[in-house]
Image (cartoon, rainbow, N blue to C red):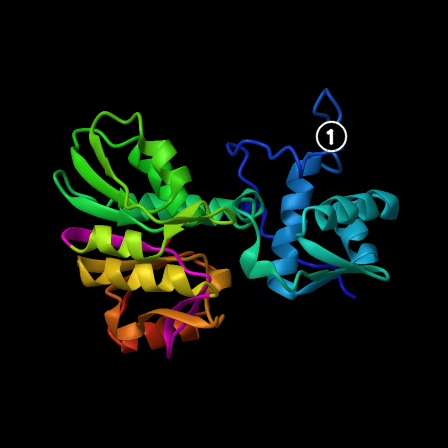
Amino acid sequence: MSELPVNASASDPTAPPMPDINAGADAAGRPAGPGLLVGERRHLILDLLRERGRVTVEALASRFETSAVTIRSDLAALEAQGALERTHGGALLSRDDDDRPLTLKRTLHHAEKVRIAKVAVALIRDGETVILDSGTTTAEIAKQIRKLEGHSINVITNALNIATLLADVPFVRLIMPGGILRPESNSLSGHMAEAALANLQADRLFLGADGLDPERGVMTPHLPEAQLNAKMIAITRQVIAVADSSKLMRRNISLIARVDQLHMLITDTGANPTVVAELERRGVEVRLA
């Protein structure tokens, strides 16, 4: 297998290290490989898996200029977290990729998600009411909202982690529906959550996605969350999908929003131009971060 290309921007030096992925780094934080910490290299391995579906020990050792023993240790640590499935001589993308916990998902395509979040927050105006769906990209939007100046906004969210990020922000009025907690996504859904949205209105919905097909729309593997998202769409003036380019052309079991329900997609510059063109042809404004 030939040497695999790595998107260097996938590693964000400002992001806090994840204890599970960084396991094995020494106390001094010395680089593991040329200029990379252990956690950074493992983040890049995960990104390669998302792009290719498979990796080999030989190609990874060559790419990161380290030993096969080190790469096997990396793969073993990532397998323990449910991120991949090891095979003889390499690893495959986990079959349960769409249902990974947030602690793992947020390490994937992190730099792209931050750029997407910055573009999204620039759309928010003083006095608006916005909905933040659950997800790792919408969590990055919450982090960017914390930095806004001269704003007073209402934020509706069904995600506990997003609520925690915004709970102490003085210019944010936080509104949370009730519901049943799904620990994997830190999100609330169900009939109670849907009923709580019935009498609300919002200016913008920032909608996360596990998959976005240019012919069908935004999809998720979780039916209760899809039903709640439908309620969010019904009370919102503008629906904005936020998804890194790895989510494009992926399909899942539950449809959240048809293409004709989307006003805008914010994704990264790695997006397939054919997909972008098809979405624009169908009336979706696409912004690349």
Q: Is residue 180 left or right of residue 86?
A: left
Question: In the image, residue 259 lies at what x, y percent?
Answer: 30, 73
Q: Residues within 10 Å of mark 1 (few under 14, many from 20)?
A: some
Name which residue lies at 37% across and 39% down. 162
Q: Is residue 100 left or right of residue 77?
A: left
Is 208 inside the magenta-drawn segment?
A: yes
- Which residue, given by chain and number where applicable, does mark 1 sit on? 25
Question: Residue 252 versus residue 31: which sits nearer the camera?
Answer: 252
Residue 286 in sight from this viewpoint? no
Question: In the image, residue 246 lies at what x, y percent?
Answer: 51, 61
Question: Residue 199 versus residue 67: which sits nearer the camera?
Answer: 199
Q: Residue furthest top?
A: 28
Residue 195 in sight from this viewpoint? yes
Name which residue lies at 68% across and 44% down. 42
Name which residue lies at 57% across and 42% down. 11
The quarter of the displayed image where residue 121 is located: top left
Q: Which residues are magenta?
A: 199-220
Name which residue lies at 27% across and 69% down. 284
Question: In the image, residue 148 lies at what x, y percent?
Answer: 25, 32
The quarter of the displayed image where residue 281 is located: bottom left
Which amino acid, mark 1?
A: Ala
Which quadrant is home to the N terminus? bottom right
Is 47 inside the magenta-drawn segment?
A: no
* Mark 1 secondary-structure assignment: loop
How many tags in the picture? 1
Question: In the image, residue 70 lies at what x, y percent?
Answer: 83, 42
Is residue 35 placed above or below 184 in the rendered structure? above
